[in-house]
Amino acid sequence: MGELLSAQPAPLARLQKDGTIVSEHRLANGMSVLLVERHADPVVAVMLWYKVGARNEREHEAGVSHFLEHMMFKGSPRFAKGEIDRLTTTLGGSNNAFTSSDHTAYWFELASDRWEKALEIEADRMRAVLLDAKEFDSERAVVLEELAMGLDEPWRRLTDLVQGTLFLRHPYRRPVIGHADALKRMSVADMRDYHRRFYHPGNATLVICGDIDPADALAKARAHFEAIPAGVPYVEADPFRPAEEPASGERRVQVKWDDEGKRLCMAWPTAKVGSDDDATLDVISTLLTGGRLSRLHRRLVVETELASSVSSHNDARVEGGVFWIFAECSQGADPARLEAEIDRELAALAEEKVPSRELARVRSLLEAAEAYDHETTSDVAEQVGEAAVDAHWKLAFESLGNALAVDATRLRDCARRLLGRERRVVGWCLPAAAPAARKPARKGARR
């Protein structure tokens, strides 16, 4: 170990901020390694990120990214099915994984004296996950059940329909979990090929965050990963994706559901991760629905009582994001009036500059959210890793400053340019049938 420690190259980049020190390294096989020192707690989070998600799937592979995430826990030559979870529990830690449109990540959180086991596990399943045929069929049934449960939820059904209407050609139109017909036809060979194309060091970013010695952590990363071949270059593995065509006018969709709820979902195509518009839309989202004093909450929930809830989300992605607004009508409220009130607030945002006092409140909320998002070791590891694979890791420490730099003019201009009615999709989930009219009670009848 002493020879390894003395042979460490200088980092490609380094950043120090608020007690956190980040250094960027690259192994000989192209694997990116980000070492994030935080010594407040004796904990280390290990996250392995692959630059692959639902966006990278061919049509017949729809859902394979999420399905493969499940299968990565089903055994390798060194760690049998269930062994990863058993070892993690024995070591007193936790593990999990998640898939998005743009990336897939696997994480462990362990005490700072025993975190190397996570590297051993990740290197082994990167190199030689089994993908056993029997386990494949068994887990496919689990994924199909997960998909069916999601489709039995009205908000999920509505957002899937809106997203599929917003993106007519790009794979972002598909839900990350995929579609049942593609999953049923998928073979073990399809998944092995997908793993071969994307699950290798040349397409991976390793984040080791917490109470670490950076030289020791880098030496361990090299020992476990550097002998694994780089794999297929990303530009060769990544399939063709058609460019999305610009919107030609407002589009409207509707879902019928067997309850009395009236749910609204609006969506606009917007910005790439890390762009100026990404930062501005974070401010707009907070202005509209961040807290009880936000514009839409105050207008819809408090003043008019048209909605029981309202929220928004700036969903920036690698190849173009979505700005979402969700609202649920109060019982007896008129859906058309609810939509009109939202339009009124959006029009004001595009026509008038936000007062400085209101903008100051929004900035305070963004600062509080940033502090919360960087509270734990795993939080920081996730922020750094996601920024690294979707844009650049420094964005994890720059995004707040980018948002705080947004002024009233930039905010108004962004709303005017991106959140117009002609660019959006409006989706409603409405009752399948009107409730039957009640007969008037007879005089003297009991309730």
Image (cartoon, helix red, strand yellow):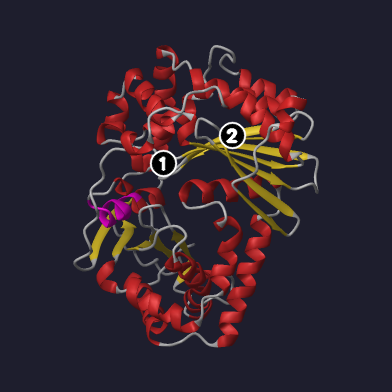
Q: Tell me which secondary structure the magenta stretch mostly adopts.
A: helix
> Which residue is painted at 59% across and 73% down in the image?
292
Q: Quadrant of residue 63?
A: top left
Query: Over which residues does the magenta segment extend?
Result: 160-168
Q: Nearer the viewer, residue 307 or 118?
A: 118
Q: Is residue 106 magenta?
A: no
Name the residue type under label 1: Gly
**Which of marks 2 and 1 precedes in the sequence?**
2
Q: Nearer the viewer, residue 328 or 373?
A: 373
Residue 411 visible here: yes
Residue 432 visible here: no
Name the residue type under label 2: Asn
Q: Which of 163 and 106 is in front in this view?
A: 106
For the residues labelled 1 and 2, the Cα–Cα distance comes to: 20 Å
Q: In which quarter of the image is residue 91?
A: top right
Work out whether 339 lies above or below 369: below
Residue 150: mark: 1
Q: Where is residue 293 in the image (x, y as percent from the top left)?
A: 58, 77
Please tell me how crowded label 1 is: few (under 14), some (14-19), or many (20+) other residues with Cα within 10 Å: some
Q: Where is residue 166 in the image (x, y as percent from the top left)?
A: 28, 57
Please tell me how crowded label 2 is: few (under 14), some (14-19), or many (20+) other residues with Cα within 10 Å: some
Q: Which of 350 and 254 is in front in this view?
A: 350
Q: Where is residue 320 in the image (x, y as percent from the top left)?
A: 36, 57
Residue picked out by circle 2: 96
Q: Where is residue 7 in the image (x, y as percent from the top left)?
A: 69, 32
How many numbered markers are drawn? 2
Residue 429: mark: none
